[in-house]
Amino acid sequence: MNKKARTLSEYVNQAHAEAAPAEPATPSWLPELRALLGEKALDTGQDAVEAHSYDVWPVAAKWRNQGKRPFAPDVVVTATGAEQISTLLRWATERGVPVTPWGGGSSVTGQPLPTRGGIVLDTTRMNRVIALDPESLLVKVQAGANGLLLEKELNVRGYTLNNSPQSLDRSTIGGWVGTREMGQFSSRYGGIEDLAVSYTVVLPTGEIVETLDGPRASVGPDLRQLFMGAEGTLGVVTDVTLRIFRLPPFRLLEALTFDGVEAGLQAMREIMQAGLRPFLVRFYDRDEARHAMQDPAFEQCVMFLGFEGVEGVARAEYEVAMDLCSKAGGSPIGAAPVEAWMARRYDFSTVENLLAEPGGLAETIEVAHFWDRIFDTYQELKKALDPFADEVLGHFSHVYAHGTSLYIILLGRAADDARAEQILLEVWDTAMTICLKQGAVISHHHGAGLARQPYVDDALGSSHIVLRRIKEALDPAGIMNPGKLGLE
């Protein structure tokens, strides 16, 4: 980018203006790269380049529909292992060639899109389970492994990851680390930062680094956290050791209705501050409850709760939770709505089908705040975003003793894809401005990517200098996934 964009609309419009021509010249360094890695590792074909020019960000869907390609690689390199990646990154640093890691391409905010062309490093063929430790309950797996395929393999052996992002069937383990991902059962099992015990990462200058392996350590800072959520800007993760769990022997589910959002938030807060450990906590406002219940006539807010593990403990926690919910005005309506949701929880088709339509627009923005500010943030976002879509939905999940995440989902239609794109950009600008004003966290677990790029400086404040200096030290040539995390 020639100048720093202050809004997403500005950023993307500038990207369109600076986009490469439809048939860019072959990079002068390409023959050298072929000689370095071998012909089979490289793909410059149109299909490969196009497949790595769009992720699942709704704005990218609108670009695809319009034939726009503002961020395209010059070449796609198939990663085969840490040594090959080390060779590639060392060469790229010397030559100043950008490298953008690519997992499943399932990001919904533009993390894997190559803002300066160059190389997209596709890790999906690095998908092998390296080792399984049934005593310590650990699995070591290559970073390109697909989440759902790994989960199925573990299930056959009686284990589970207990990590279930909606993108489980299309995301990779390395992508989870890179985006600081979190699954739907986080209230009991935590996010990837709690589940990843160690990993191997290749630095931009070619060194292969293994983080400290152990249940806990007090040997300097926890360097695992350095690359967690770094979105590929500091190196390439090549394998990850994850905690796993035995399949739960017992599970209890319940849906409860509430008359208003504040009552449901009170119940969620009381449950978490009482020290209970539900594996599932999701609370929907009236607008989204109709979708969650699959009933257009549904008129109340609804909460989905789940407890699992040792039967006696799960039953006891369930009873305490029901009492807390009752005191907040909640009324149980049975397990059937939660069971139905569990069966379809990876289904993203409502959003994808709408985005595929000319003019169709859909967006999901997740943020987080403390309990004393989350309701005000929810109200302001709902009111401000209402003019942009036919439906503005809200739900709360990923719950803590001190706060919660909030999802705002928009569904609507515009005159055409160009207008839909512009509306989506305005939605992001509006939502991020409100979150910064409210003091909310601008991303809970989808990461920053391109969608939040103009707002990272303000979101991190004075601490952004630490990230910049780490970037300068580890990536002196600035080759790794440029244009992300406020690191232009």
Image (spheres, rainbow, N blue to C red):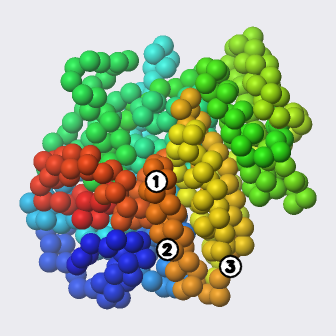
Looking at the image, which residue sits at the far top? Answer: 312
Give the residue displayed 64% in from the left and 56% down from the top.
Answer: 379
Q: Mark 3 points at which residue?
A: 413
Give the residue displayed 26% in from the left and 18% down from the top.
Answer: 218
Q: Name the residue under label 1.
A: 442
Is any atom of residue 188 visible in this view?
A: yes
Q: Mark 2 points at which residue?
A: 425
Q: What element carries label 1?
A: loop
Q: Residue 234 location in percent, x, y? A: 24, 49
Q: Residue 322 location in percent, x, y? A: 80, 25
Q: Nearer the viewer, residue 429 or 47?
A: 429
Q: Residue 473 location in percent, x, y? A: 13, 48
Amino acid under disc 2: Leu
Q: What element carries label 2?
A: helix
The CA span between labels 1 and 2 is 15 Å
> Which picture quadrant has residue 275?
top right
The 10 Å Cα crowd at callout 3, few under 14, some 14 to 19, many 20 or more, is: many
